[in-house]
Image (cartoon, grey):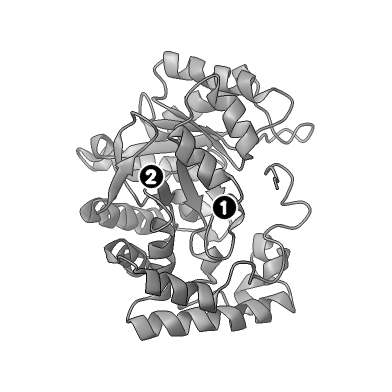
Amino acid sequence: MKTTTMGRGGPEVSQFGIGAMSFAGIYGDATEAEAHAVLDACRDAGVTHIDTANVYGNGRSEEIIGAWFAKTPGARDDMVLATKAGISRDAERRFNNDPGYLSECLDASLARLGVDHIDLFYVHRYDRVHTPEDVAGTLKGLIDSGKTRAIGFSEIAPSTLRRAASECPVAAVQSEYSLSTRAPELGLIQTCAELGTVLVAFSPVGRAFLTDDPFSYERVQSMAFTQNNPRFMQPNYDANIAATDRFRALAADMGVPAAALAIAWLVARGEHVIPIPGTKNTDHLAELLRGMELTLTEDDLLRIETVLPIGWAHGDRYNEAQWKGPERYC
């Protein structure tokens, strides 16, 4: 398993993490047994990073991970554990970075996870009510309390990262990044490298478009997130399937699963890029992990860019409502 450092001076971590939203999230829930099987397989493969959040299943994802720690001796010590907070359930205010609120959320996450500290605590959404410097100062206080070892931000602009890092080192920034969503190349991946921050890439297989088994249109219609997402609405859905058919054919020609090739492409972007795919299925996990065994040549990368040139995707990655919270830039 390839490894990297989680932030400048941070712990060594596998350059592949498991995204635990799939245990209790927008694509349906896993049973506890399914989720624990995935976590067992990750540990056996040398995966040492688990990423979750307090909003995934309203805490259910954290509870599943906590139950796994409780029944698996040594598992907590083996893992670099991350969770997030900052998305408010208060209808009056969608995002909340108040010091008291973040501290309260972290305490609740620790209880669900059954641990006395986590390794990385993210602000899930920057609320823009506070300055980046003030939010970083709040998070620094949580480091000082011993409840987290490092801090991160999710879905922020490079300029916000720079301002936050001026107050406290930022170990990680989480952003959607894949062959289908390449906005981080417009300054974020570069700023992370400059500051010693890892870029944690969620949805690295393009919400299943970059796999050998993309969501059927019927399944898309059964999930609230995808049925209203521009890339999954017609005629974009059919166009995106047709575009990624070329990628699936290339992966087959190279003798690897499409998901593995998508992961390998991300890892090739730099040692500071960590894909965190999610899955409820150990067979799919094996396909994803296969990507960590691949070393892509310049010719391989050129072939990938030829079948999926930058900007190939039809439709925006979010609709208007889904764009509330993430920072746009460039």
For the point 61% across and 43% down, which residue is it? 155
Instruction: Assess whether mark 2 and mark 1 are in contact (beta carbons under 8 angstroms).
Output: no
Percent of width and height locating residue 128: 72, 30
Residue at disc 1, secondary structure: helix
Q: Is residue 48 visible?
A: no
User: Is 20 placed left or right of 156 in the picture?
Assistant: left
Percent of width and height locating residue 305: 51, 72
For the point 48% across and 23% down, which residue is it? 107
Q: Earlier in the sequence, mark 1 or mark 2?
A: 2
Badge 1 is on which residue? 185
Image quarter of residue 90: top right
**For mark 1, does the 10 Å Cα neighbourhood hold few (<14), some (14 to 19), or many (20 or more) residues?**
few
Q: Nearer the viewer, mark 1 or mark 2?
A: 1
Which amino acid does the dot numbered 1 rest on? Answer: Glu
In the image, residue 293 sits, relative to residue 185, either above or below, namely below
User: Is 10 placed left or right of 111 in the picture?
Assistant: left
For the point 34% across and 65% down, which residue is it? 291
Residue at disc 2, secondary structure: strand
Percent of width and height locating residue 100: 61, 17
Number of numbered markers: 2
Which quarter of the figure is the N terminus placed in? bottom left
Which amino acid does the dot numbered 2 rest on? Answer: Ile
Image quarter of residue 217: bottom right
In the image, residue 230 sits, relative to residue 252, either above or below, namely above
Q: Residue furthest front?
A: 298
- Of 172 and 104, nearer the camera is 172
- Of 329 and 71, nearer the camera is 329
Which numbered dot is residue 50? 2
Which numbered dot is residue 57? none
Percent of width and height locating residue 321: 77, 51
